[in-house]
Amino acid sequence: MNRRDLPPLTEPPSVSAMKNIAIITGGSRGIGAATAILLAKSGVDICLSYQSDKASADAVVATCLAQGVQAIAVQADVGMREDIVRLFATCDAELGCPNVLINNAGIVGEAGKLVDLKPAVLQRVFEVNLFGAVYCCQEAIKRMAKSAGGAGGSIVNISSMAAKFGSPNEYIHYAASKGALDSMTIGLAKEVGPEGIRVNAIHSGTADTDIHERSGNPDRPAMVASINPLGRVARPEEIAEAAVWLALEKSSYTNGAIMPVTGGM
């Protein structure tokens, strides 16, 4: 078959005419908050979840509302399936059916060697970082899949460069949960691509957030900055820019990708 026998090229289906509605887990601070605000600036309605910091979540919602979009915050424990079901149902009722999901919520647990890892910490890290993402993907697919009457959509999983490097002596349990998230991203992209759903992930580098301080390892960002080729850690907005690109139609032919945003680490 020569070139003239090929069918004419067609543009990918445009979703610009439809209203984008995004669910962002862990959206009250850090990368999640930055992503919510950038999506709002792109005209996307926002439903963010938060664990306990209502004041911060409300502040993010206010910033999103100032962009002229609709925005709500829903308290939810991402590791609890019933909370995820309620999160999506609330979005349906107050904003409409979401066509963007950002699986951002994540914890590192306590820093330390694997031999000293507490069972409760291991359980909780996987509940939030992996099980919660699975629950969210299940609910999103039910709404986005063409076979279910949906119009397609986009899922972005915020993973970590720890999945590649393993984080020995610090966060092997966290790295393992993110490695599993990467595997899910690749498999799910192939599974639901025919349903009009793209699934991608970001290997986030260490960012300037309080996640390491909360894990009892406050010096880690400075250590990473000292060995990073760019000489610093990421700003949350820099990770968010990649997430927004993957979430929206400018990346319409990107599926199953794991994008490193690590400063060259």
Image: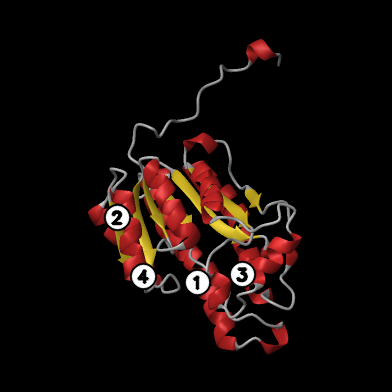
The residue pinned by badge 3 equals 177
Q: Earlier in the sequence, mark 2 or mark 1?
A: 2
Tell me which label, 3 or 2, sits earlier in the chain: 2
Q: Mark 3 is on which residue type?
A: Ser
Q: Position of residue 239 (x, y in %)?
A: 56, 52
Tell me the quarter of the image containing the C terminus.
bottom right
Q: Are marks 1 and 3 in contact (CB under 8 Å)?
A: no
Residue 62 badge: 2
Q: Nearer the viewer, mark 3 or mark 2?
A: 2
Spatial CA distance of label 3 from label 4 is 20 Å
Q: Which residue is mark 4?
A: 76
Question: Cβ–Cβ below 8 Å for labels 3 and 4?
Answer: no
Helix, strand or loop status at disc 1? helix
Q: Earlier in the sequence, mark 1 or mark 3?
A: 1
Label 3 secondary element? helix
Residue mark closest to the camera, 2 vs 1: 2
The residue wearing badge 1 is 128
Quadrant in which the N terminus appears: top right
Q: Nearer the viewer, residue 192 or 206?
A: 206
- In-image side of 99 versus 6 (left or right): left
Residues at marks 3 and 2 touching, judged by CB atoms closer than 8 Å:
no
Looking at marks 4 and 1 on the same chain, the residue that comes earlier in the sequence is marked by: 4
Label 4, residues with CA under 10 Å away: few <14, some 14-19, many ≥20: many
Foreground tag (4 vs 2): 2
How far apart, in angstroms, are the residues tagged by discs 1 and 3? 9 Å
Q: Residue at x 37, y 46 (%)?
A: 40
